[in-house]
Image (tube, grey):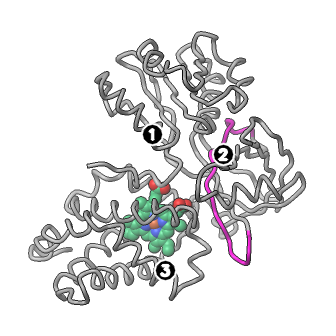
Amino acid sequence: PLSDEQKQILKTTSPIFKENGKEITSIIYKHMFAAHPELLNIFNRTNQKNGTQPFALANTVYLAIENIDHLDTLLPQILLIAHKHRASTVQPEHYPIVGKYLIIAIDEFLGGMGDPSILSAWSAAYNIIASIFINIEKKMYSELGDKTEQGFIPFSIIKKETIAIGPTVSFTLERRDGGKIHDYHAGQYITLRIKKDGLYHIRHYSLIEPFDGKTYSIAVKQEKDHEPKGIVSTELIEKYKEGDLVTLSLPAGTYALIKDAKHHLFIAGGIGISVFSAMILELHKQGKSDITTLIHCVPTEEQAAFTDEMRIVLPKKQYHLLLQGKRLLQETIAKTIMAKTQVYLCGSPTFMNKVEEYLAQCGHPPSQIHIEAFQPSLSLLKD
Ligand code: HEM
C-alpha cells in the first residue's frame, strides 16, 4: 500500500501527467519499442501514429492516480481496457516493462532530475494499478480455456462481400483448427492479426450479427480520405480473398444492450452502424423491434451498410437514414427520444461530439448514453 507521504507526492505531481501525459507516454513508447521491438507486434500502430493510444494510457494513469483510494469507481473503464488487453494477448510479464519505461519517461520529462521519492511513489502507484489489470486479465484468459484458446487462432474467410461503397466489405470467418467456436454477445468484437512486412498488425472489429453457432462476421471499411489509413483494413480489403486464412483472438468487449430497457435508440455515423447491426438483429430475435429505433447518418445512401437488413427488421417509422446536408439529425433525435430511452452512440469523434452536445442540451441523463468508440475510448476523455 501507499504511504501517506507517497499519496501526497502523487497528488501534487499528477497534474504533470495530466498536462503532459501525451508527451510522457510518447517518451515511454519511444524507449520501450527501442528496447523491446517484439512489442511492436502487439500495439496497434495506427493508433500509435495518430496519438490516441499514448493519450488513452496517459489519461488512464492520471485517472487511476486521482482515484487511487477508490479504484472500484473506475471498474467499467478498467474492464473495457482489460478486455482490449486480453484480445491483444497482453501478458503479465509485459507490465513491468511498461512500468520501467513509465518511470524512465517521467524522470526524462523532469529533465533527469526526478526526485527519487517522486519516482518511487509513481512506481508504487503503477504497481497497484498493474496488479489490478493482471488479476482481472488472468481470470479472463482462464475462462477462455487452454493456451490455444487464449491466443490467435486460424480462421478462413468463407465469404467476402462488398456491402456499401466506400468500400465497406463484410467477411464471414470459420474456425480452421477443429476447435469450438465461442459464444459472444451483441456489442462485442473480435481482434484480427495479420502479418505484413515481417511484423504482426492487430485490429479490433465489431461482430455484425448475433451468434449463429458457426461463424464470426465483421464489416471492414477502407479509409481512403483520412490519414493514417488502417493497415489491417486496407490489407484485408485489397489482398484477402475467400479461402484465405486469417488469425484472430476470441470475442471480447464490454459494450452491450441494456437489459429491460423501455426504448433503445441507436445513433450511428457511417460505419458506426456495424456494432449496432448485431444489437438490432439481436433485439429483433428477442421480439423487441417495436422498442428499437435507428438513426443512421451517411453522406449518401450507397455508402450506408445494412440498409436491407434494417428495412426488414425495423418498422419503417423507426429507421431513419439521414443523408448529408439535410440537417435533420437534431430534429430526428428530438422526435424519437423519450425520458427512459437508452441511447447508443457510435461514429467518428466529430460526429459523436455533436450528438453528445445535443443530448446534453436536451438534458438526457449521461447514464442513459452508451458510447462505442472506433479509437481507444479513453483518448476521448474530457475534463
Ligand atoms: C489498450 C491502458 C498496460 C498493451 C489500452 C488502452 C488503455 C490502456 C487506456 C485503450 C483502451 C481503449 O481502447 O479504449 C493501460 C494501462 C496500463 C496498460 C493504464 C498499465 C497499468 C499495458 C501493457 C501492455 C499494453 C503492459 C503490453 C505491453 C495494450 C494494447 C492495447 C492497449 C496492445 C490495445 C491497443 C489498440 O488496439 O489500440 N491500454 N495499459 N497495455 N494496451 Fe494497455
Query: Which span of residues is magenta-colored?
Result: 195-212
Mark nearer the viewer, 3 or 1? 1
Foreground tag (1 vs 2): 1
What residue is disc 2 on? 183
State whether label 3 is within 8 Å of ligand 1.
Answer: no
Name the residue at 58% across, 45% down: 188
* Mark 3, secondary structure of its residue: loop
Q: Provide residue 26's location: percent of width, then percent of height.
A: 41, 73
Mark pair 1, 2: CA separation: 23 Å
Q: Secondary structure at mark 2?
A: loop
Q: Which residue is mark 1?
A: 371
Residue count near mark 2 (Cα–Cα under 10 Å), binned few <14, some 14–19, many ≥20: some
Image x and y of residue 306, in percent: 70, 29
Crowding near the residue tagged with mark 3, few <14, some 14–19, many ≥20 C-alpha atoms within 10 Å = few
Q: In this rendering, is residue 137 above or below 212?
A: below
User: Going by the image, does 166 lie left or right of 355?
Assistant: right
Percent of width and height locating residue 115: 17, 87
The verdict on residue 43 being magenta is no
Whether residue 134 is visible, yes or no, is: no
Residue with the mark numbered 3: 93
Dot 2 amino acid type: Asp
Provide the secondary structure element on which disc 1 rests: strand
Q: Residues within 10 Å of mark 1 (few under 14, many from 20)?
A: some
Horizontal and vertical percent for residue 98? 42, 78
Q: Is residue 3 above or below residue 146?
A: below
- Residue 371 in view (yes/no): yes
Q: Residue at x 57, y 58 (%)?
A: 143
**In the rendered view of the protein, which quadrant contains the N terminus?**
bottom left
